Image: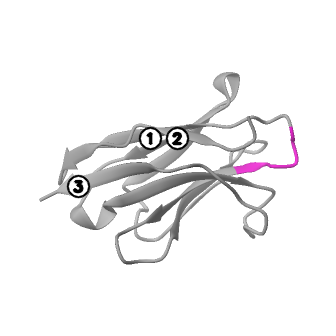
Amino acid sequence: QVQPVESGGRLVQAGGSLTLSCTASRRTFVRDILGWFRQAPGKEREFVAAISWSGGDTSYANSVKGRFTISKDDARDTVNLRMNSLNVEDTGVYYCVSDRDLKWGDIYWGQGTQVTVSS
C-alpha cells in the first residue's frame, strides 16, 4: 500500500504507557521518513516524532522528548511509537505519515488512530 496504516490507539490512564504501530511500504524508496503527527480536539495537527528508514536518525517534538521513543523494524516495514508517562494533553488522533524528508512537503497520511488519556 502507499498510505501508512496505524494501529494501537486506545483508552489509557494518565501515567500509563502505550505503543502505536505503523506499517508503510518502502517500495518507493525516496520516502525515507516515517513519523507521527497528532491532533487534539480543537487544535491543529502537530508533529510528534519521526525516523529515517535509511539512517535511523530520529526527531522529536519538545513536548514528548524523554517520554516517547520511535523505532523501526526493517524486516516488517513497521515503525513503532512507544509512549510513556502519558498525560491528558497527549489525547488526540495520532496519524502515521511518510515523506521524502523532514520538510514535510509531500506527506502521505494514514487514517489515524485515537489515543485517549484519562485523568
Give the foreground label among 1 and 2: 2
The quadrant of the rendering that contains the C terminus is bottom left
Amino acid type, callout 3: Val
Picture coordinates of residue 61 (x, y %)? 50, 68
Residue under circle 2? Answer: 6
Q: Which residue is identified by label 1?
A: 20
The reply to whether residue 16 is visible in this rendering is no
Task: Categorize mark 3 by other alpha carbons within 10 Å: few (<14), some (14-19), many (20+).
Answer: many
Would you call the spot at circle 1 few (<14 residues within 10 Å), some (14-19), or many (20 or more)?
Answer: many
Would you say residue 29 sits in the magenta stretch? yes
How many angstroms separate mark 2 from mark 3 (CA)?
Answer: 18 Å
Camera sees residue 40: yes
Which of the two labelled residues, at mark 1 and mark 2, occupies the earlier sequence position? Answer: 2
Name the amino acid type tagged 1.
Answer: Leu
Seen at 23% across and 61% down, the residue is 87
4 or 90, which lies in front?
Answer: 4
Query: Residue type at mark 2?
Result: Glu
Marked residue nearer the N-terminal end (2 or 3): 2
For mark 3, what is the residue?
Answer: 117
Which residues, given as a range, are shown in magenta?
A: 28-33
